[in-house]
Image (cartoon, helix red, strand yellow):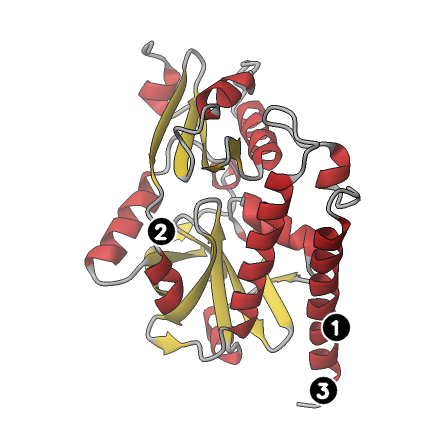
Amino acid sequence: MEHDEGYSFGMGVFETMLVREDRCILLERHLDRLRHGLDALGIDVDFDPSVIDRAVSGGSLDGRVLKVEVSPRNTILTDRVNPYSPEDYDRGFSLRTSRIRRNETSPLTFIKSLGCCDSIMEKRRAKADGFDEALFLNSRGEVCEGATTNIFFTDGGRISTPRLECGLLPGTVRGFLLDELDIDETIIMPDDIRSYTGCFITNSLMGVMPVSSLDGFPFTDRSVADSIRRFYEDEVAKRLRCPHRTGTAFHPSCLLGTCRWDRHAHRDARTFMLRVRRFQADSRRRPP
């Protein structure tokens, strides 16, 4: 490792990815975000994704977390245990609002830069006080994101999440769900939260995590969160099984959902998505 601006000033980016069956989940989304972050910081590094392929081949990292850090002179790969357990999903996470505000005017808010001390500090403070995650508001008092997660709220078939402009990192799982489901990107104020009956958070390691409470307010309906979690995990499993995959990349037809391999599996996934969308539409037509 060379001493560079990454060490001195936090000028660098990183990605954390879940490894399964010698593959990083949602790898292309992670690579796109990493490259965007390097461009935003003006770091002229041509990152070679083959280092990831070499790191995960052989099965030694299956089920573990791979972290890739890139700065002007360094590319560092490390791995660790996935911190989330089945018991976490069973009970759901409890959240509390942080006293620190996200800066929606800073370009660093929108990239996964090495300088993320406020997120780590607030997550540790929350856990020390018996919570699982900290939730940030921006300087205007709008809900934006968790310390290491994106947040979604549900009410029957309605799913809402803060707009990107509120000041948040565009998560890979967040992006996947926005592409696949009917989700409203909107401005959510703290006073709006009590109008929702359900909540869940997402990141690349936990996938979809139900939320049981926020600042002591209980969410009583986790059916949508559980359904979306099943859908996400099924889609991940199907893409891992697809024979089109080569190295760390997937065939474009698999990424677009038009792959004809295991047509029954793909049909089941599409049927589930249509069922969710019908449920959302019916809920919207239902009188209050």
**Quick one: SS at disc 3?**
loop
- Marks 2 and 3, the one that precedes in the sequence: 2
Q: Quadrant of the C terminus?
A: bottom right
Asked whether the beta carbons under mark 2 and mark 3 sit within 8 Å of each other, the answer is no
Which residue corresponds to mark 2?
84
Toward which corner of the image does residue 46 lie, by quadrant?
Answer: top right
The x, y position of residue 250, in whole percent, is 67, 32
* Residue 15 at x, y percent in the picture: 46, 33
Identify the residue at image location x=62%, y=54%. 177
Considering depth in this image, is 145 or 224 the residue closer to the camera? 224
Residue at x-position 75% and y-position 46%: 257
Eyeballing the image, is 248 above or below 90?
above
How far apart in space, not on screen, are marks 2 and 3 (Cα)? 37 Å
Callout in the foreground (3, 1): 1
- Bin the neighbour count of mark 2 within 10 Å (Cα to Cα): few under 14, some 14-19, many 20 and up: few
Count up the numbered dots.
3
Left-right relation of 122 to 28:
left
x, y percentage for residue 123? Answer: 30, 51
Query: Residue 280 or 260: which is nearer the viewer?
Result: 260
Q: Secondary structure at mark 2?
A: loop
Which residue is identified by label 1?
A: 278
Name the quadrant containing residue 44.
top right
